[in-house]
Image: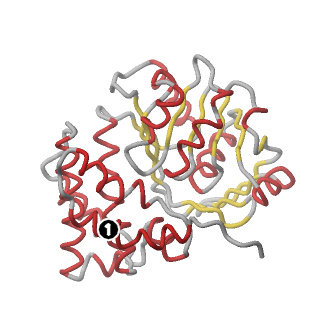
Amino acid sequence: MRFVVFGTGGVGGCFGAQLTNAGESVVFVARGKHLKALRNQGLRFETPEKDLLIRPIEATDDPATIGNADVILICVKACQVPEAAQAIRTIVGPETLVLPLQNGVEASSQLSDVLGSRNVLAGLCGTLSWVAGPGHIKRAGSHNFIKLGELDNVRSERVERLRRVFAAAGITVEVPANIHKALWEKFMLMTAFGGVGAITRAPIGVTRTVPETRRLLKQCMEEVLVLAQARGIAMSETIVADSLSFLDTLPPVGTASLQRDIAAGKPSELEFWNGAIARLSQQIGLSAPLNKFIYASLLPQELQARKPQPPL
C-alpha cells in the first residue's frame, strides 16, 4: 500500500518508520530543518530495542506532488486538522483512506466536512515518541498502538486489510467494536491528565496523590462522561475509576503534551481538549464547570503562544 504520513512528528515518524521498515511505500510530509534532514540523511528511528536508519526515504512539504495515495495518516496536532484536510484534497482518490490519529473527538468530522465521509475513518493512537532532532524520532517504552474503525462501526474489508498491514509492520493494532467509545475513553483520560497538569504545573505523580488535585482529575473525567452519554456514547459504568487507575500506573514524572506545550509557551491542543468539552457541553445545555475553568485559565497563554513571533 502507498501511505502518506501527513505530519512527521512523534506519531507520524514512529508509525511511518515502522511501515517503511516493513517494506511499505511511505511518503513523509514535513517542513523546515526536519524535512531537509529527512531528505539528506534519512530517518533515524531510535527505540529502547534498536536504532534504525531508514534511507533513502520520500519526503516533501508539498502534498500536491505526491499523486494519489492508498492511505493518508493525519498525524498533525488537533488544531491543524482543518488545514491538513485542505492540503490533501488533491491526493485523495475514490479509494483513498484517511485515518486521523489525534487526541480529541472532532477530527473525523472535520475531515469529512472537506473530503466527504466515504474516505474517512476514525482512529486514535498511543505512543511516547517525539522529535529528538531534525530527522530523528525517539520512542520510549513499548506501549504503542493504533485503533481504527469505520465511522458507522461496520467491520469492513478495507479496515481489515489496513489492520493486517499495520500488524505486519509490527504495530499493535485493534479494530474496536465501537471506535467512538474508544475515542471518548482516551479523550476522557487525556483531557483530565493534560488539563489538571497544565493548571497545577505538576506531574502526574503529584496530581494523583494530593487529595484535592485527585478530586480535580475525577471531576474532569465525570464531566466528559456526562457529555459522552448525552451524545449517545455507551461508556462503561466503571470508566472513571478505570481511567484513574490507569493514571496511577504512569511514571510519577509523567506529563501530557498539552501541559508541556503550555509550559513551553507553544501553541497547544487546548481548544480541542478542555476547550472542546466546554464548547460541546454548552451546545447541549450542560455545564462542565471545571473544564470551562481550565480552558479559561489557560486561554491567555494559548492566545499569546499563537501570536506571530518577531524575527530573530
Classify residue 81 as left or right of residue 179.
right
Q: Residue at x 55, y 76 (%)?
A: 264
Residue 92 visible in the displayed image = yes
Task: Tell me the amino acid under the disc marked 1.
Answer: Thr
* Coloring scheme used: secondary structure
Q: Residues within 10 Å of mark 1 (few under 14, many from 20)?
A: few
Residue 166 lies, with reference to residue 311, above or below; the image says above
Left or right relative to 210: residue 19: right
What residue do we see at 25% from left, 59% from top? 243
Q: Position of residue 69 (x, y in %)?
A: 66, 27
Q: Secondary structure at mark 1?
A: loop
Residue 68 appears at what percent x and percent y? Answer: 69, 24
Q: Which residue is mark 1?
A: 249
Q: Is residue 236 left or right of residue 194?
A: left
At a point 34% along the width and 36% down the height, the residue shown is 179
Q: Is residue 44 above or below residue 59?
A: below
Q: Residue furthest right?
A: 40
- 111 above or below 295? above
Q: Quarter of the image containing the N terminus? A: top right
Say which quadrant the C terminus sits in: bottom right
Looking at the image, the residue that sits furthest to the left is: 237
2 over 219 or under it: above or below: above
Residue 1 seen in this snapshot: no
| Number of marks present in the image shown | 1
- Residue at 48% x, 52% y is 144
Please state which of residues 21 and 33 is positioned toward the viewer in this rendering. 33
Quadrant of residue 210 within the rendered picture? bottom left
The percent coordinates of residue 60 (x first, y second) are 77, 43
Q: Position of residue 109 (x, y in %)?
A: 42, 35
State the residue in front, 249 or 71: 71
